[in-house]
Image (cartoon, helix red, strand yellow):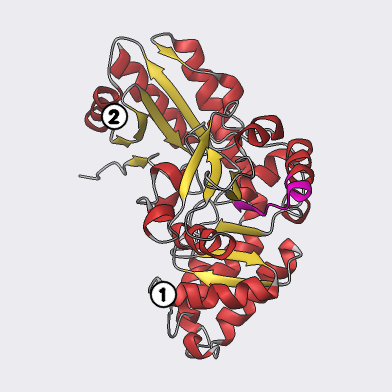
Amino acid sequence: MDTIKPIDLRSDTVTQPSEAMRRAMAEAAVGDDVYGEDPTVNRLEQRAAAIFEKEAALFVPTGTMGNQIAVRLHTQHGQEVICERRAHIVDWEMAMVSAFSGCQLRQVEGERGVLRWERIAAAIAAPIYYRAQTGLIALENTHNMAGGTVTPLAVLEEVWAGAAERGLPVHLDGARVFNAAAALGTPVSTLTRGFATVMFCLSKGLCAPVGSILVGSRALMERGRSVRKMLGGGMRQAGVLAAAGLIALEEMPARLHDDHANARWMAEQIAGMGGCMIDLETVQTNIVIFRPEGRTAAEIVAGLKAQGGVLCGTASAEEVRFVTHHDVDRTACERAIFALHQVLA
């Protein structure tokens, strides 16, 4: 008897590498990257820097490591990092801003995850000796826990200008910045030109099995290489991973519109079925967050798994989260919505 394949909407991190990626990994030219001798890693870093129009890039195992390297590069112990209240560096990076860089997070409430300069400026520490000084502004685009919302270019330009006037660097957690670029129809180089550093993930919607990239100036990336080693990120024959990353970087951004269309379709179905509350304004990319009425998010997650083999996650105790990606097509989305109908009924 054939078993029905589960529909995995927990995250775009569950994507499987393509056949082309698997072949490239098997055939990759490799060397010792700690010595800077892995040709495939070097090619990936060069290509990433070119796409983002930055001087240099650094291949890292995870997005968290990339973000934490950036924080360490831009700050001194005892400073503050301004970020949105539900940013990834707040909720999902194991307090490393304080544990590793000796800084505290100054959390600011955004508008659906979008931080505007007016709110950032109000949070910048006054230049007095008895208060911790602001060392860095960190933005997230798209914003995961706000539902994949996109910060528009005009908002970013205002932040870049204001930060430059105050002499403050700005870092982007761009784990899904290619989703933001696809939604806005704007090249990632334009969308990130005012950031001192940008981290983006290869292993989410771009489908690589492992890896993220940090881009910035050549001087920062040279220092970043030492910080990566401090965090245990010095990899050896990492070209087997970088080979998949090259395909992810070159080929996968063009198909992200499909994920966005599937997420929007699911959100509209949820909005129309009753028994759930959803803000359609937040469904701008590949994340759908909704609140079931009269049930906890955990109850819905368990019900979907039992009812139709649909795997999903939560954004809070009251919020269910679906994430669309390469491995979930429209038919699978339709099955998931049918299963949700049954669970709610």
Q: Quadrant of the N terminus?
A: top left
Q: Secondary structure at mark 1?
A: helix
Residue found farthest to the front? 129
| Disc number placed over residue 284 in the picture, else none | none
How far from the left and from the top, in percent, is residue 35?
A: 51, 91
Please give the name of the residue rendered at 51% of the width and 48% of the height, measured from the top-left corner: 326
Q: Amino acid at mark 2?
A: Val
Can residue 243 be seen here? no
Q: Is residue 170 magenta?
A: yes
Q: Is residue 1 left or right of residue 36?
A: left
Q: Position of residue 46 (x, y in %)?
A: 68, 76
User: Neighbour class for label 2 at 10 Å: few (<14), some, many (≥20)?
Assistant: many
Kindly identify which residue carries mark 2.
301
Against 207, is 317 above or below? above
Going by the numbered disc 1, the residue's amino acid type is: Met
Q: Determine which residue is flagged by label 1.
A: 230
Pick whichever, 250 or 279, lies toward us: 279
Relative horizontal placement of residue 106, taking residue 125 as reference (left or right): left
Please, is residue 315 above or below residue 21 in the view? above
User: Where the C terminus falls, by quadrant?
Assistant: top left
Residue 9 shows in this picture: yes
The residue range painted magenta reads 163-172
In this figure, what is the number of numbered marks? 2
Local crowd at mark 1 within 10 Å, few (<14), some, or many (≥20)?
A: few
Q: Quadrant of residue 337?
A: top left
C-alpha separation, residue under disc 1 versus residue under disc 2:
39 Å
Residue appearing at x 47%, y 73% in the figure: 228
- Residue 39: give x, y in percent of width and height: 58, 87
Instruction: Please give the name of the residue rendered at 52% of the width and 23% of the height, measured from the top-left corner.
Output: 267
Determine whether 2 is above or below 108 in the image: below
Choose between 113 and 24: the one closer to the eye.
113
Q: Describe the element under mark 2 as helix, strand or loop.
A: helix
